[in-house]
Amino acid sequence: MIIVTGASGRLGRAVVDRLAEQVPIDQLGVSVRDPEKAADLAAHGIRVRRGDFGDPDSLAYAFEGATQVLIVSGPADPEPHHVAIDLAKTAGAERILYTSHQAANADSLFVATRGHAATEQDLAGSGVPFTALRNGFYASTPVFLLRSALETGELILPEDGPFSWTAHRDLADAAALALTEPGRLDGITPALTGPELLDYADIAAIASELVGRKITRVTVPDEEWKRAALGRGMPEFLADLTLGIFAAARQGEFAVVDPTLPALLGRPATTLREVLATELTG
């Protein structure tokens, strides 16, 4: 049985939808914090069980009978992922897959990518065949940051650098392929990225074209941005996490475009313009 964690989230749900088209429903299970949010999956015959990274007993129950487990990464802290790896192994999983990050590196300026690097080490030391899917930076991230810019006409952010923004649907297709075609993606994968490098000035220009009004990219010092973010009610840990993304981007940590993803999919990777067109104009 294939078990997918985080199946009520955007990526996890997309993976489950792909798998439901390719494998018998009775061989597919999901682990979610709130089973009610996956009630429609249960109605289609998919096994739904509560599984919470903060509750090992629930994860052990969710992983029962697993032959493969896809751990959709959650918090920056690698410890919950370490626990999930151990529990998947205990459950008898013959292969463990994990959604890592293109910039996973113990020396990264972004805390989450340091966490991904630690989890990759845990996978390599688990003694179980594994796949660490080094996913590109999610294309949904600038969509979130553009929401207020659409109202004010200004995209106010710290200095950044280029990102290879990657669509959830492409990454879901790659994960489904990894789960259904063992051997195609083993070990730590190359970076699974979108087709081009774009910074937030590029994003502001694309968004301006799509919505038909000017959005100006405004660069401010990190601390000024943080003060404003805290004033809007953003938790401090999230503000610091976000600043880590910009610091890493300035160092070029996300400035990688790799041909692996389109080669796997057999089609071009989705562009950020396509994602923004859907998200901003519906």
Image: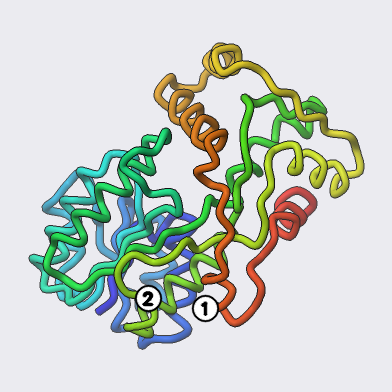
Choose between 140 and 8: the one closer to the eye. Answer: 140
Q: Is residue 243 left or right of residue 114?
A: right
Few, some or many C-alpha atoms within 10 Å of disc 1 (few <14, some 14-19, many ≥20)? some
Residue found at the very far right of the displayed protein? 212
What amino acid is labelled 2 in the image?
Answer: Leu
For residue 173, the mark is: none
Is any part of residue 55 visible from this angle?
yes
Q: SS at mark 1? A: helix
Residue 77 image position (x, y, % from top left):
28, 39
Evaluate if marks 1 and 2 touch, with contact meaning CB atoms under 8 Å apart: yes
Choose between 273 and 57: the one closer to the eye. Answer: 273
Q: Which residue is mark 2?
A: 185
Q: Is residue 87 left or right of residue 165?
A: left
Residue 119 image position (x, y, % from top left):
25, 51
Q: SS at mark 2? A: loop
Residue shown at 67%/57% (left/top)?
196
- Residue 224 higher or lower than 241, as above or below: above
Task: Determine which quarter of the picture holds residue 51.
Answer: bottom left
Is any part of residue 47 visible from this angle?
no
For residue 264, the mark is: 1
Residue 1 image position (x, y, % from top left):
24, 79
Sequence-wise, which precedes: disc 1 or disc 2? 2
Few, some or many C-alpha atoms within 10 Å of disc 2 (few <14, some 14-19, many ≥20)? many
Residue shown at 79%/25% (left/top)?
152
Q: Is residue 157 left or right of residue 263?
A: right
Residue found at the very far left of the displayed protein? 90
Task: Determine which quarter of the picture holds residue 202.
Answer: top right
Choose between 184 and 44: the one closer to the eye. Answer: 184
Q: CA distance from mark 1 to mark 2?
A: 9 Å
- Residue 149 higher or lower than 254, as above or below: above
